[in-house]
Image (spheres, rainbow, N blue to C red):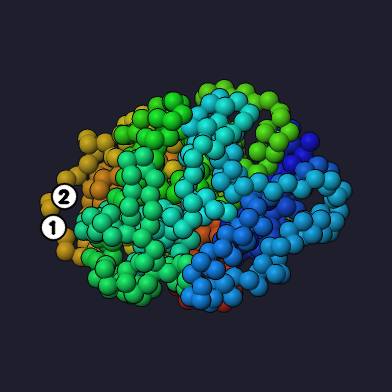
Amino acid sequence: MNILGISAFYHDAAAALIHDGDILAAAQEERFTRIKHDPSFPINAIRYCLSEAAGNAKCRCDVVAFYDKPLTKLSRILTTHLAVAPRGLKPFVAAMPVWMKQKLWIPLQIERALRDLSVEPTKEILFLQHHQSHAASAFFPSPFQSAAILTMDGVGEWATTTIGRGRDNRIEILKEIRFPHSLGLLYSAFTHLCGFKVNSGEYKLMGLAPYGEPKYEQLIYERLLRCKADGSFRLNMEYFGFLDSLCMTNDKLHRLLDGPPRRPESEITQREMNLACSIQKVTEDMVMRIARHAHEITGEKNLCLAGGIALNCVANGRLLREGPFEDLWIQPAAGDAGGALGAALMTWYQAKGNGRVANGVTDAMKGACLGPCYRDEEIRAFLRTSGYPAREMREDEWAAELAKLIDAGKIVAIFVGRMEYGPRALGARSIVGDARAPEMQSRMNLMIKYRESFRPFAPACLEERCGDYFELDRASPYMLLTANIKASRRIEVKPNSARTLAERVHQLRSDIPAVTHVDYSARVQTVSKDVAPRFHSLLKAFEERTGCGVVINTSFNVRGEPIVCTPRDAYRCFMRTGIDYLALGSFLLDKTQQPVWQDKSDRRNIDVLD
C-alpha cells in the first residue's frame, strides 16, 4: 500500500510517501520552487515522492492523508473573529481569499494533481488533526515501542499544545491547550519584538538569547502568562494583536516592554538581547513543567517531541539533562513539513491497523535523508553542458581531499546523496569549515550566509568522539540538542571584558571556538558511520589529519533561500558566495577555476528582511 501524506497552506508545505510502513521519500515544496517556507500545494514534492515509488511515469497511490482538518480550522477562525468583532474584521478579510481559492477545495486539488502526474486516482482521502499528525511524526518513526508524546506549536485547528501516549501502533491524545493560548505564538510575538521575521526568525531569537539577561522574565509571568504547576497556561490577550489585528503585538505590550519592535536590520541593542533571553528562559521553564506533567500522567520513561517548539534545541537539551524522562526522540522535521509524514504514518498504523515493532535503538528516518539524489552521471552531464571545470575524485580519496582543504582554512560545500528532510543540513547539503579557526564563525556568517554575525554554527562530531568534546552521553544525529563544551576544552573569559555584541562574538571560549556559543554551549550533530557513512568518512579523515573530530556544519544555502536541491542550485550558491570549493557528488570544483559568474542575482538581491 502506498500512502501519500501532504501538508500545505500555512508554511513549509511538504509531501511524504510510505510503502507498507516504510518511509520512501519526503521533501518540502520550498526546495523545488526556491521560495523559502513555501506554503503552496506541494505539487513538485508530490511528483518527486511518487517518482521514488514508481521508477516510471505511472504510480499507484492508494490513500492520500492531509495533515489537518481545514473545516475545523475555518470554524476556529470564524469563531475567533466573531468573538472580537468588529475589531477582528481586518484579519478576517485578509484571511478569506486563500480559503475561498484554495483551502476549501483540497480534495479537488489532490485529485487534479494526481491526474496531472499520470497517477491512478486515489479512492480515499483522509484528513487528520494537526496535532495528531505531529504526534504521529514523533512517535511512529521513533525507536520506542511506547512513549509519552508532547507536541507544541503556534496553533493547529484549535490545539496549540498536546500531551499524548503512543503504544505499539496507536496514539492517544490525553490533554490539550487551545488557541489563543499558545507557547509558540508567545515566542513568535517576541521574535517580532526583536525585529525578526515570524515563522523563520525564531532561530535568531534563540541564538541571541545567551547574550542577554532575563530582565523581563518576572514581568512575563506577572502580566502576560498565567501558568499552573502542571504546565497548563493562559495568555493575557490584552497584550497581543493576533486576534484582532494583522500584527503579533500591540501598543500595550510595547509600553510594558520598553518600546516598539526593533526595526529589521537596525542595530541590535541590549534590550533585544534581554527580551530574547527572557522569553527563552520562560519557554524552557514551560516545556519542563509540561514534560513533567506528561511523565506523571503517562508513566512512560521515554518522550517523543514534535511541533515548532520541538526545534528549540536549547529547551531540548535542558529537558534531556533535567527532565524526568530517560530518553528523548525528536522528529527532525518537527514543524509543519513533518505533518505530511505524520499524516501518512497515522493512516498506515492507526487508521489501517497495521502492526509496528520498534527495535529500541534506531529510528525509521534513515538519517532524514529522504529527498532527491543526483547520480554522478547526471552531475557529469550538468558540468559538461554548462562548461564548468571540475576534477573527478575517486571514492577512496574523496574524504581525504576535502579534509585537506578544510585543514587549510578553505570553506567547502558538500552536495552528495539524498537531500535532507526538515530544516537541518546533516552532511548531504552542507557547508563545512574548520571549527578550530577563531575567525570562521564571522567569516561564514558575513561572506557566505549573509546573516547576523552573532548567529552560531553547529558542530558535526564523530559520534564515537562526542564525549571528548561535549557534555553529552548519547547520539544527537539531527542537530536538535544543545550541550555544553567539556570544561577541559574551555577558555575562560573575564566578565565584562567585551562591551559590544561584536566584541563578545569574537571572544575565544574553547579550542573549537567557531562552534562555541557565548554560554559555552553548542548545537551538536553526532555523525554515525552506520547512518551517514560518507560524512563520517570526512570527519574521520579530518581527525586523522588534525587530531580534531569536529567540523562546522551549516546548511548549504544563503539567507532568504532554501537549502539547495539540484546541482544547478548548488553551483549558483557556490558562485554567489565566499565558498572556496564545491564537492558536487564525486566532482570537486575550485572557485578560482570557474568562469566569470554572469548571474545578476547576487547578495544585494537577497531578502534583507528575512
For image coordinates 22% across by 36% down, the residue present is 487
- The mark found on residue 346 in the picture is none
Q: Nearer the viewer, residue 220 or 435?
A: 220
> Disc 1 to disc 2, how far (Cα)?
7 Å
Residue nearer the viewer, 54 or 245: 245
Q: Quadrant of residue 28?
A: bottom right
Q: Secondary structure at mark 2?
A: loop
- Give me the disc on residue 493: 2
Measuring from the top left, give residue 355's x and y in whole percent. 68, 25
Check the picture and name the quadrant holding the N terminus. Answer: top right
Q: Which mark is residue 497?
A: 1
Q: Residue at x 39, y 40 (%)?
A: 290
Amino acid type for the residue under numbered disc 2: Val
Q: Which residue is at a point 59% across and 43% down the rendered structure image?
A: 132
Q: Is residue 189 visible?
A: yes
Residue type (three-letter) at the residue carrying disc 1: Ser
